Amino acid sequence: MSQSAKSPNATAPELISVIIPAYNGLPDIVEQLDALAAQDSPPPFEVVVSDNGSTDGLADVLHAYPHRSRLRLRCVDSSATQGTPHARNAGIDAAQGDFLLFTDQDDRVHPGWVAAMSEAAREFDAVGGPIEVQTLNSPRVASWRIVPAPDERFETAYLPFAHGNNFGMWRHVVDRIGQFDEAFVGGGEDGDLSWRIQQAGMTLGHAPDAMVAYRLRTTMKATWRQALAYGRSSAQLTQKHRENGCPRRPITFNIAWNLRLLATNPLLPQRLSRFPRGLWVLAAGVQVGKATERARHEAAQLGGLVRGRQVLDLPTAHCGDWLGACDSGAHDAQRGDDAVDEIALAERRDSRRDA
């Protein structure tokens, strides 16, 4: 566990509430629930699934889930407002625990996750943990994401943050600073809450043994869509916290990044760029998403919100179509006639995660 200043929580939580926002999460959420049911020597905990309007029969599956009693499993309706932040907030309202843990429907917690987060809760107001991408993804897809080592936190140029699928906080944190900001519909609500915790003088620790396996987007088209959302939420986060000291990247940094992206773009032969194409798509999409959100913000200030957003969204749509063709070509080359079915399955999974 790491963090310079510690919080005087001398005792472990009496009851932990594991909150899972869900939207058409079958069958992945069953795998996540199985992982929670198989925890090693966990302290007392309950599981609250916050159903954000699923249409895949999730409620019936949860009602019949064989380990329902062991997990103290409950399902709450959060369909009034679409989005992960609202689903998490509805889960907070329904939770009975004094320590709140968050993970996602399509990931998988490691066996010691609950115990490690509970132990870290003794020392900090809020806690984050590491993620890994090897367990749930093919080697090809895993190469599309670089994550910190287990003992390293998620750092930014401003303050560290906890990843939303591996995060915990005492209820007194919510009582003091409020819940997740539902304005962050495309992501970023975890970074926002992490920063607000630290701005309020509370501690955000890191539990390196509380590992979560993270399921990545499996096509470049879906990765592009996710990257655009990441970029937009990153710019939104910077705009919200600028008055609190959050710096904006200097133009020289953006120029250097763009030059690197040009030098490693997927149009070059792989032997020349030596850069995984999915990783390039992620990095490029984040940059485009940031630029889009900044332009939208500036256009809004000038009274041209709709026009500014529409002009910038045109090329992103064309990029998504082109990347979809790249996915088809890559799968055809590697797997033959089964590629169409595999891509269709991947797109169904990825589309529900982006909804």
Image (cartoon, rainbow, N blue to C red):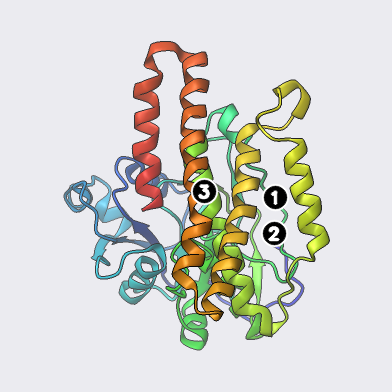
Is the Cβ of the residue at disc 2 closer than 8 Å to that at disc 1? yes
Along the line of sight, which residue is nearer the eye, 64 or 287? 287
Going by the image, does 161 lie left or right of 68?
right
Please indicate whether residue 81 sits to the left or right of residue 187 in the image: left
Distance from label 3 to label 1 (Cα)? 28 Å
Q: Nearer the viewer, residue 25 or 205?
A: 25
Which residue is drawn at the image coordinates 25% and 55% (left, top)?
69
Do we see residue 102 in this rendering? yes
Quadrant in which the N terminus is drawn: bottom right
Q: Position of residue 116 (x, y in %)?
A: 57, 58
- Residue farthest along the top direction in this orientation: 336
Residue under circle 2?
Answer: 153
Disc nearer the start of the sequence (2/3): 2
Q: Amino acid at mark 3?
A: Thr
Residue labelled with disc 3: 316
- Where residue 333 appears, as percent x and y from the top left, is 52, 14
Task: Note whether residue 119 is visible.
Answer: no
Label 3 crowd bin: few (<14), some (14–19), many (20+), radius 10 Å: some
- Does residue 62 appear to the left or right of 46 in the view shown? left
Residue type of the residue flagged with mark 1:
Pro
For label 2, the crowd category at 10 Å Cα-Cα, with few meaning under 14, some 14 to 19 and many 20 or more, is many
Q: Secondary structure at mark 1?
A: loop
Residue 326: x %, y % from top left: 52, 28
Locate residue 241, reporting x and y percent. 63, 79
Comparing 189 with 255, the one in front is: 255
Q: Earlier in the sequence, mark 2 or mark 1?
A: 1
The residue under the point 65% across, 39% down is 280
Rounded to the nearest whole Å, what is the CA distance between mark 2 and mark 3?
31 Å
